[in-house]
Image: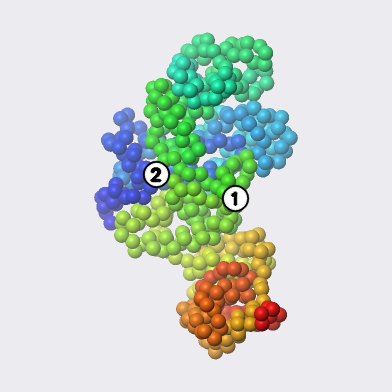
Amino acid sequence: MSEADLIAAARVSKAWPFEEARKLLKRFPDGKPDGTPVLFETGYGPSGLPHIGTFQEVLRTTLVRNAYETITDGAPTRLVAFSDDMDGLRKVPDNVPNQGLLAAYIGHPLSRIPDPFNKYESFAHHNNAMLREFLDRFGFDYEFVSASDRYNSGGFDDALKNVLAHYDGIMDIMLPTLREERRKTYSPVLPISPKTNQVLQVPVEVVDAQAGIVRFEDHGEVIDHCILGGHAKLQWKVDWAMRWVDLGVDYEMCGKDLTDSVTQSGRIAKVLGGRRPEGLIYELFLDEKGEKISKSKGNGLTIEQWLTYGSEDSLGFYLFREPKSAKQLHIGVIPRAVDEYWQFRGNLADQAIDKQLGNPVWHLLRATGNGSGAGDTLPVTYGLLLNLVGVLGAHATRDQVWSYLGNYVDDADPAAHPDLDVLVTCALAYNRDFVAPTLKKRSPDKNEAAALAALDEELASTSDDATAQELQSIVYDIGKDPHYGFEQLRDWFKALYETLLGSSQGPRMGSFIALYGIENTRKLIAEALDDPIGEDA
């Protein structure tokens, strides 16, 4: 495929990153007028530990950035990851140590609060470092920008003066959106109290816009105060608009909960002499109870948790899909995401170009610079691996798993299958923490025991070299035999899972028997048949 063919296909692709990229192409048909790179931005509020909801915005924005570069044949771009670390701490997160320490700093800028982990100069610096570590691990090409650095260094001083110069126009936009009580205290500017060092929510009077001087009441005393050089920050929606204008942001996506904020900040950006960027409004992630994920509650998955039980690739795959649909984000979604990723990756090489561009793996491989992974497959699914580990028990080891993989995988060596080896480690952790504590085998009833005995007899005369499909046919034939009384095949398979594996669902049994070994499977059957038979026997 030529580069021209790729560009032509990308410009009509219905994959959401290309649809987003075409918004920018429409905005800048001939590139930006001043020839500067198109600027993509992501925002992060370090009021709590970073979770996957934070990470996904950088990933998804990177995918749009790559799509834009594809359809423009390499037009220059930049990506800024911006941290709102001048925000005042509103409440103490539930998932951090030394909560009493943080409680004493309610209202203080996040970058001026001690780190409860005692590792960095502030709580914001700790959380920023965690975010950057995760982004660097995935190889993102980005520039990190801190609000506190910009405010404290004077980098936003001209922008602050611009806000003061257009103070009335901004108030005209914001006041109609507020409740009556909030209108009495609202100000686009949040001065930092010289007395308490807290971010204040007080009415402000502009004294001298060009000098950055405002007047307000600070704990009973009316003072004139210069907001430049880190002595104030802007109210969030005004801050967002100011940033768009000052940095020249062309694209930024956000969650559905910020839909109204996008509208209001866009109007403020226009008052400040700029333009609202293009962007995608995505649905929010929910926890397993269907509740919104919150940094302060800590009810979302951390990136470290996902990578303990699943691969980096599967995380990217899960985040790629259907950004405009709400999805639950919890431990239970990981195994399916792993297997679906490898299914899509295996299909990629044989797909026509339009299908490739709609395949999430095409975008993910391009984002990581690994274009050679198309068509790769795993010799064993993650689901099957989990079933194997489940049978081996909570104390199974990596070497044990690889020993059993020798029944099923050619050249069963971790060095020859590094992607599978990663998943072996993940499966051991997943089984230990979530599967093994819940497994409980039940005794077979009379008909199930007869069917298991028949399966054992068939396996006894089956060659160790039998393929997974041949073994699956044996299992099928027994389940379809009316002698054993299974109304549907799924009843037979459920019986196999519950009596042999201790779970209500499981793998293709032919594949499992081939992986676990015929003799070992016969031992499982023997254990099940030695158990007391149910009451209906």
The picture quadrant where one finds residue 520 is: bottom right
Q: In the image, residue 250 lies at what x, y percent? A: 39, 34
What label does residue 321 carry, if any? none
Q: Are the residues tagged 1 and 2 within 8 Å (C-beta)? A: no
Residue at the (61%, 72%) spot, across then down: 498
Image quadrant where one finds the C terminus? bottom right
| Label 2 crowd (10 A; few <14 / some 14-19 / many >=20) | many
Q: Nearer the viewer, residue 469 or 441?
A: 441
Q: Secondary structure at mark 2?
A: helix
Q: Is residue 277 left or right of residue 455?
A: left
Q: Nearer the viewer, residue 69 or 391?
A: 391
Amino acid of disc 2? Val
Residue at the (46%, 25%) spot, across then down: 242
Question: Can residue 209 be seen in this snapshot?
Answer: yes
Residue at the (59%, 72%) spot, across then down: 497
Mark 2 lies on residue: 64
On screen, residue 300 above or below 474: above
Q: In the image, residue 492 lies at what x, y percent? A: 55, 76
| Label 1 crowd (10 A; few <14 / some 14-19 / many >=20) | few
Image quadrant where one finds the N terminus? bottom left
Q: Secondary structure at mark 1?
A: loop
Q: In the image, residue 232 lies at what x, y percent? A: 57, 21
| Circle 1 or circle 2, nearest the eye | 1
Q: Is residue 221 left or right of residue 315?
A: right
Question: Can residue 78 be seen in this snapshot?
Answer: no
Amino acid of disc 1? Lys
Mark 1 lies on residue: 289
The picture quadrant where one finds residue 421 is: bottom right
The picture quadrant where one finds residue 252 is: top left
**Earlier residue among tags 1 and 2:** 2
Q: Nearer the viewer, residue 478 or 464?
A: 478
Looking at the picture, the colour scheme in use is: rainbow
